[in-house]
């Protein structure tokens, strides 16, 4: 195990000029975040939200216009990338095509002027770790995409950095390989105990890999939390929509006691929980995940079935409640009553599955 370090961003902003309008804009806007040593953290958000810019500032390829970045307790704004104790794995792999696997991985060690025997031992050990033992003599153009990505990972790991940075490293691979490589990256990261910061726009990748997910939206950190916190307790509609599917129902909190309350939605009284941050009489939005509700003969909200599809593991419904269409995934429907288009029924869910948002 190597010594992993945490990272801290304090009030970090990056200003770029919009090439079309010529105006300045903040590609990263007052980002504050703490990454614990040894954790796997994902920067997740749509294209253009500032993920790569944030990662490149941590690596030292870009410098922030405001704020300070710390590696462990050390401020690193003034350090060049090679003095930062971080290593980056790129989407394009960025391997040297005229070098074989061994020389690609050994490159950073040779720069550090290590002796030949030490380099040989370190390279062979790391190739073993990424399951490329025996491939050291191959040229990189004789390797598959997945193998090239392993070489890139080995090259980053071999210099024993305190932090590993990934920018969409799997996006050039086919879907199946992406899934197996992400498991491997997670396993290797845990075995080595290194801090990892991973950029992706793929929510399932973020969920599968992360101790913590940082959701970004238009340069701003929208939410930081474990995958469960982000999924079950999204802070706003953007986060709720970006991670998984979500239904939204507008209403009013009629009464509350502790964390329980009653919401009126289209004049129906609905039991809800997790209402601590809301006041009696406040307008609010109920977030309901499609898999946390079912369609029944009795329930909280009357509905009309607009679509009903058998999907194997679930019955997929679109139902109309008031003037909104809800998407419901009713799992394991084998022995259940299946409702058809045009049927009147009820949406049923447990109060503990409710989550409320401030109405925007
Ligand atoms: P992401 O990685 O989330 O897709 P980026 O961090 O690459 O987003 O980019 C954030 C925003 O900054 C985008 O609007 C992008 O066009 C802009 N941007 C990135 N790099 C530069 C640059 N060197 N000059 C001007 N604008 C840039
Ligand atoms: Mg990017």
Image (cartoon, grey):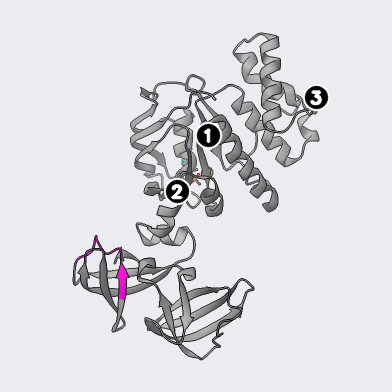
Residue 215, relative to residue 152: is it above or below?
A: below
Residue 297: which numbered mark, if any?
none
N-term-proximal mark, 3 vs 2: 2
Identify the residue at horizontal 37%, vertical 81% (top origin): 300
Residue 140, relative to residue 119: is it above or below?
A: below
Q: Is disc 3 placed on a helix, strand or loop? A: loop
Is any part of residue 95 visible from this angle?
no
Q: Which portion, as a residue range, is magenta?
A: 271-279
Q: Position of residue 61 (x, y in %)?
A: 49, 29
User: Is residue 276 a member of the stretch shown in magenta?
Assistant: yes
Residue 236, relative to residue 338: is it above or below?
A: above
Q: Is disc 2 placed on a helix, strand or loop? A: loop
* Quadrant occupied by the N terminus: top right
Mark 1 highlights which residue?
165
N-term-proximal mark, 1 vs 2: 2
Instruction: Using the image as rendered, state which of residue 142 and residue 97 is in the foreground.
Output: 142
> Cα distance, mark 1 to mark 3?
27 Å
Mark 2 highlights which residue?
49
Is 111 situated left or right of 73 in this image? right
């Amino acid at each position: 195990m190597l010594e992993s370090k945490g990272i801290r961003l304090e009030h970090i902003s990056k200003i770029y000029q919009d090439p079309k309008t010529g105006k300045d804009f903040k590609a990263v806007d007052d980002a504050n975040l703490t990454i614990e040593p040894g954790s796997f953290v994902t920067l997740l958000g749509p294209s253009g939200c500032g993920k790569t810019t944030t990662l490149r500032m941590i690596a030292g390829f870009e410098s922030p216009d405001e704020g300070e970045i710390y590696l462990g307790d050390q401020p690193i704004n003034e350090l060049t990338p090679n003095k930062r104790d971080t290593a980056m794995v790129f989407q394009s792999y960025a391997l040297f095509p005229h070098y074989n696997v061994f020389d690609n991985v050994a490159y950073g060690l040779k720069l550090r002027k290590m002796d030949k025997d030490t380099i040989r031992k370190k390279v062979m050990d790391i190739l073993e770790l990424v399951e490329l033992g025996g491939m050291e003599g191959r040229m990189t153009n004789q390797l598959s995409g997945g193998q090239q990505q392993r070489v890139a990972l080995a090259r980053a790991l071999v210099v024993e950095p305190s932090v590993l940075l990934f920018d969409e490293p799997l996006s050039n691979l086919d879907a199946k390989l992406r899934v197996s490589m992400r498991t491997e990256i997670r396993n290797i990261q845990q075995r080595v105990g290194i801090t990892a910061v991973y950029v992706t726009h793929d929510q399932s990748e973020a969920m599968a890999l992360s101790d913590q997910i940082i959701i970004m939206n238009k340069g701003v950190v929208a939410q930081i939390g474990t995958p469960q916190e982000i999924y079950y307790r999204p802070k706003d509609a953007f986060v709720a929509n970006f991670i998984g599917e979500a239904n939204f129902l507008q209403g009013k909190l009629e009464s509350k006691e502790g964390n329980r309350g009653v919401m009126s939605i289209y004049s129906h009284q609905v039991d809800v929980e997790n209402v601590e941050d809301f006041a009696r009489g406040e307008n609010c939005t109920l977030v309901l995940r499609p898999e946390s509700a079912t369609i029944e003969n009795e329930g909280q909200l009357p509905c009309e079935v607009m679509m009903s599809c058998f999907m194997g593991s679930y019955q997929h419904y679109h139902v109309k409640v008031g003037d909104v269409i809800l998407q419901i995934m009713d799992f394991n429907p084998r022995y259940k009553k299946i409702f058809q288009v045009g049927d009147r029924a009820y949406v049923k869910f447990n109060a503990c599955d409710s989550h409320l948002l401030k109405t925007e």
